[in-house]
Image (spheres, rainbow, N blue to C red):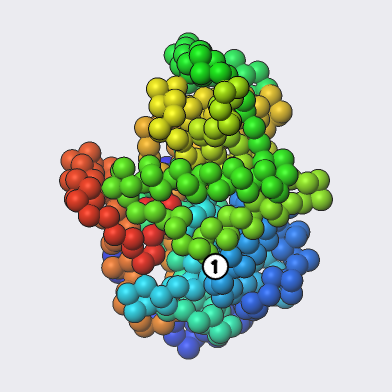
Amino acid sequence: MVNAKDISAPLAAPSASARARHIANGLSARVVSDPGRVSEVWQALEADPAMTFHQSRAWVEAWAQGTGVNLSIVTLEQNGTAFAILPLETVRMHGLTIARFAGTSFSNENTGLIDIAAQSRLDPVAARDLGAALSEAGLGADLVLFDKMPPEAAARAPFSALPRTFHQNPSFQLPLFTDFNAVLAQINSKRRRKKFRVSERRLEAMGGYRHITGGTDAEALRLLDTFLEQKPVRLAAQGLPNVFADPGVRAFLRKLATTRDATGKAGLELHAIELVDTTLQPQIIAVAGLTIKGKHITCQFGSINEDIAADASAGELLFFRMIEHYARAGYDVFDFGVGDQLYKRSWCPQRTELVDCYVPLNFKGRLAAPSITGTIRLKRAIKTSPVLHRIVARLRSFTVRKPQHATHND
């Protein structure tokens, strides 16, 4: 577990000597709005399996095109050599302008795009120096928040010296092996197989089922649209806002689902369980969306139709089939993403405590930093306390309001 630094006291303003020092140490930043202007460096850094899909050009450009946000693509250099690209967006929150990873409200883990091989050759990057470099480069923000970072990513420059706190939610992972029996052995294979057989029997009694994927754009959009119909029903039943209602978010997901690489692999892969009944039209009863980076699978979202085959655990069946497929195909990890939920705990023997790092760029940002991190800590306290969590859930059940900046894992 990473040790979060105490951030109760805001950083002091960078002095004139600090601003001069970052130049003397060779640290500089450039900000552009067009990813194409840094495509060569981006492509090289993105190829590293340690960098998450959430900083890929596919993710960032789909987010920008779908939502219309203004991108600030920051390139950090030391002594003229680029060692990091930070794809950022700026948002207004409570009178404050915050720069953050592009699309982070729907991402699971962020790493930035970092040249890991260059880390040993870099001079230390102090928080004040980074703030001064970003400010002098013209990044229009009061504070930069690098959220949902795995500990190993937060330990790299330029993040390693930044103040931090634990993120409000952990993420959950299931290691994969080509021997699927070994995968299930990590999570009570006897019980898991029994649940699988019960689900199959119940669906077979209703005419059978099939596990389908969005192999074409048309099929991918059909499955995505089904998810966008199913999910709000479930969220409303839980007293939660529909964070997928915004047209920009829907456009982002559609763009990602139809963005394909040279091999035809989509940025967002859609999977589903379809109930087959010869007397009725096929019915999709569970949907999941996945992103893939190297041999790391991340589940971005899932939904079920609770009006049909409610007792068949279609969501669990879909996870079983997806995990089985990717394990036997040689992938390393099935990541259930951010958010502490019972079904994730039941599938995952590993959890990762994520961290949020920050750097203020001006007096306003330094003044606001304690309240921002205090809010994160409060959310974490609520989520880790069964009593507080029940109280908040009860309050939400009385009235559901869509927050101005809702996220899919708040």
* Residue at figure coordinates x 31%, y 43% from the top left: 238
* Residue at figure coordinates x 37%, y 73% from the top left: 93
Query: Which of the pair 254/131 is nearer the observer?
Result: 254
- Is 216 left, or right, of 86 in this rendering? right
Res 191 → quadrant: top left
- Is 67 left, or right, of 363 in this rendering? right
Q: Does any portion of residue 174 appear in the rendered image?
A: no
Residue 15 picture location, percent across and down: 44, 85
Residue extending farthest right: 262
Residue 178 picture location, percent across and down: 68, 22
Residue 360 picture location, percent across and down: 42, 75
* Residue at figure coordinates x 40%, y 48% from the top left: 232
Q: Does any portion of residue 395 appear in the rendered image?
A: yes
Residue carrying label 1: 67
Residue 70 picture location, percent across and down: 56, 75
Query: Which of the pair 123/172 is nearer the observer?
Result: 172
Q: Quadrant of the N terminus?
A: top left
Q: Amino acid at mark 1?
A: Thr
